[in-house]
Image: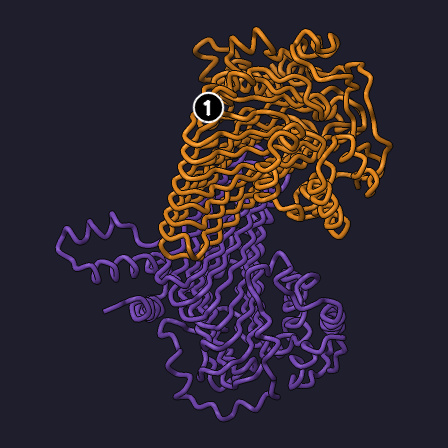
Amino acid sequence: MSMVTGNSYLESLLQGQPQLPPSPLAWFNQLRANAVDRAGTLKVPTTRDEEWRFTDISPLAKLSFQPLRGASRVKTVDVERFYLDEAAVRLVFVDGAYMPQFSTSPNRAKELGLVVTDLSTAIATHGVAIEPHLGRHAGFEHNLFTALNTAFLHDGALVVVPRETAAREPVHVLFIATQPEAASHPRCLLIAESGSSVTLVEDYVTLHEGAYVTNAVAEIALGDNAEVNHIRVQRDSIHAFHIANCAVSLAHASRYRSVSVALGARISRYDLNVLLAAEGAECTIDGLALITERQLADTHSSIDHAVPNCTSRQLHKCIVDGAAHAVFNGKIIVRPGAQHTDSTQSSRNLLLSGKTRVDTKPQLEIFADDVKCAHGATVGQLASEELFYLKSRGLSEVVARNLLTYAFGAEIIDRISIASLKHRLERTVLERTQRD
Amino acid sequence: MSAVLQKLVNQPYKHGFVTEIESDIAPKGLNEDIIRLISSKKEEPEWLLEFRLKAYEQWLKMEEPRWPNVKYPKIDFQSISYYAAPKQKKKLNSMDEVDPELLRTFEKLGVPMHERAALAGVAVDVIFDSVSVATTYKQKLAEVGIIFCSISEAVHEHPDLVKQYLGTVVPVGDNYYAALNSAVFTDGTFCFIPKGVKCPMDLATYFRINTEESGQFERTLIIGAEGSSVSYLEGCTAPKFDTNQLHAAVVELVALDNADIKYSTVQNWYAGDENGMGGIYNFVTKRGLAKGVNSRISWTQVETGSAITWKYPSCILQGENSVGEFYSVAVTNNYQQADTGTKMVHIGKNTRSTIVSKGISAGHSNNSYRGLVRIAPTATGARNYSQCDSMLIGDKCGAHTFPYIQVRNQEAKVEHEASTSKIGEDQLFYFAQRGIGSEEAVSMIINGFCKDVFQQLPMEFAVEATKLLGFKLEGSVG
């Protein structure tokens, strides 16, 4: 596929993208074509754009891009260590390409009553189910990266949980980066039909410490009374660029819980847009960014209370060390008429070094009067009273500090329901925050 | 209940009347000649004219800010008259010489001029359409060395002081409206508190826009020398007009070592009618520089008027251990729009700031809090606490919060809290049970909501503010 964008940086980003075969489905081809058109007119955001004010992605433009090589070099031993014991079904993508040899067979999912497969095969068999959702939740009108992802729509993860089906074991979608100087566009679509429940682990890992670009888009649609537990772990290389957009839409009385953990990437940007589209919907969104050296982690969330009687809870934490920079922008919108909205949001930032930088903006936009909305933000060091309390019980200064720092991060990790993943992340938090 | 309250909230603007006084009005439009005209009318020194022209030059290159959360038709800056002064033959020595028409106006407004001023212990520097008419208590203040006069007078009498500080806190090119003000400001207040002097009384000035279609460009400069302290009150009312009036004031405060400046405002300008017609555009730049060690700058504002309010009284905390405070109540009703808040820029070590903002929206209005807390890398040990609460009355209004927190120093502590609430039926029921009518109940709830801010106001202002809020809002709940 050729793209004329009138933008030299984009041209270079597009280099090395494989030719995508046209799909037999007209709407699918149209979606891609629209995204191509849109990407051509959008500009690369700069710090002059309010939404990117604190996140300078100009280093991304300096990266040169190589064509993607085949993924056959990747051995099972390389990827095995990322598997989760608890996950009954697994989809593995290497540099954006579906790897059936590492994934569990579609039949395994079928036995559990689920559809877990790659998007390019599913488009032929499940086109009717996919059409109302794919590209409909994650809008690309104003988002260049989502437009690019949609333009390259080919492989991707599809998870469909049919009506009244409860998936007991989690579904693990693993995206592995193996090649430096490459750009991949992972895509994930989860459709939780009415009355269903599922746990989805969206996992980004790497086999090397080079520079590359991951531009991910996830769409999650919840039917009436559906329940989705979404765990997102970003463990990209410390030199990588991770740009992601997750769009969630909640129907009547559905429940969405999300824990996202950002550990890697030189620059990471996560946009989480939750639309509470029908009454009685609830969402709980928790995030942890643990960054050091010259890392930048940017989380932009938007929780849109479009209708009355919905509840949202958000806790976002950052542990910032070295010369790292944490950005948080949490927007809560209460639309006209969305009475009895109950929303709380909290942004907590812990600074471990003198060169760190934090920009946080919890933002409320309220157009209804009978609502409960509260938000809070804190930035600072460990509280001296808490240190004193521990020291008075015989802990040394260092031990007390380590304990409190760990506990700060563990509050979010604790909310992960999968034991093996939780332990792994707990270990990472320990390793990263403990001082001698 | 609703009908009674509706009647109350829809009270006509009490201060809407036009005083007929002969005015000396400059032709409409803005260009270098107008600036030269203003400067020569005011017999200004050369450096001030240069200051104005530099500002004008910068203003031409700037664009009107579009980021505030307010909507209004484009302002035609060429259709505004930039100079209007009541015709005056000679300098006045006593109140008796003042135009009786003017005095009647003040009476209608309830301005405590002479006796009332004396009773209230307030010196009022009355600003009437840009030119200072009478200044009371000047002698008494002069005894302790305090200079309190109009800024045009200060330009002539104390040129060195004005030259040293004017434009140092708000540079001429700071923002669009500050640049405009710097180019065309006609009058305002100047205040200098000398070293070690505690000002014996609260200083006050009443602003009042009078001539239809004349923008008002006030300039206030207050300097607190080492160890001094002063409390300054600003109160505003304006007559009712249908064409929008632009008000772009600049207030600069400078606090040197151990100085303490407290600046309180009650703003009740014409807000437009219930359909959003008319009203004042209030685009104000207010900034205080806490320059010296242990200095303190405190802003308190009660904003109830204006069709559009766009102001961010700010503190630059440069001196070590300096303190910045911002206490605000902003009330919007009908089609009013307010985008207000503060900036606390921590530069010095161990600087502290407190922000308490209460926004109340009713009718079809929109009320935004926009704040910035910036901790510079040098501000070790800095501390900020912010609280911004919103109350919505009715389901057609909006409340917005945009708090920017930027921290560049590890040893700083920043806390921000915000909440939204309404006046609940259960609360009103509770009052009713105890024999308190809904009107009074609403008034009590609102006053409770705003208590933290009202406590910061000087007594006379607190009384006025409480009444004002009652008038503005009582009818909105039902």
Q: Quadrant of the N terminus of chain A?
A: bottom right
Query: Which of the two residues, B431 or A362, is positioned nearer the viewer here?
Result: A362
Residue B299 in sight: yes
Mark 1, other Cα within 10 Å: few <14 / some 14–19 / many ≥20: some
Q: Quadrant of the C terminus of chain A?
A: bottom left
Quadrant housing residue A32 = bottom right
Which residue: 48% across, 77% down? A239
Residue A169 location (% of width, % of height): 40, 67
- Say left or right for A388 vs A200: left
- Say left or right for B264 vs A24: left
Query: Which of the two residues, A43 or B253, is positioned nearer the viewer here?
Result: B253
Up the image or down, B220 lies above or below A118; here it is: above
Query: Which of the two residues, A110 or B459, is positioned nearer the viewer here?
Result: B459
Up the image or down, A94 lies above or below A36; here it is: below
Residue A231 location (% of width, % of height): 44, 64
In terms of secondary structure, where does tag 1 sit? loop
Residue A152 location (% of width, % of height): 66, 76
Quadrant housing residue B106 = top right
Up the image or down, B193 lies above or below A120; here it is: above
Going by the numbered disc 1, the residue's amino acid type is Cys
Instruction: Return the residue at label 1.
Output: B199
Up the image or down, B135 lies above or below B69; here it is: above
How many numbered marks are there? 1
Which residue: 72% across, 42% down? B52
Query: Which of the two residues, B307 or A229, is positioned nearer the viewer here?
Result: B307
Residue B399 in sight: no
Residue A104 location (% of width, % of height): 46, 80
Which residue: 38% across, 65% down? A321
Q: Residue furthest left?
A: A394
Chain A: its colour in the image is: purple
> Which chain is home to disc 1?
B
Q: In the figure, the orange chain has which letter?
A: B
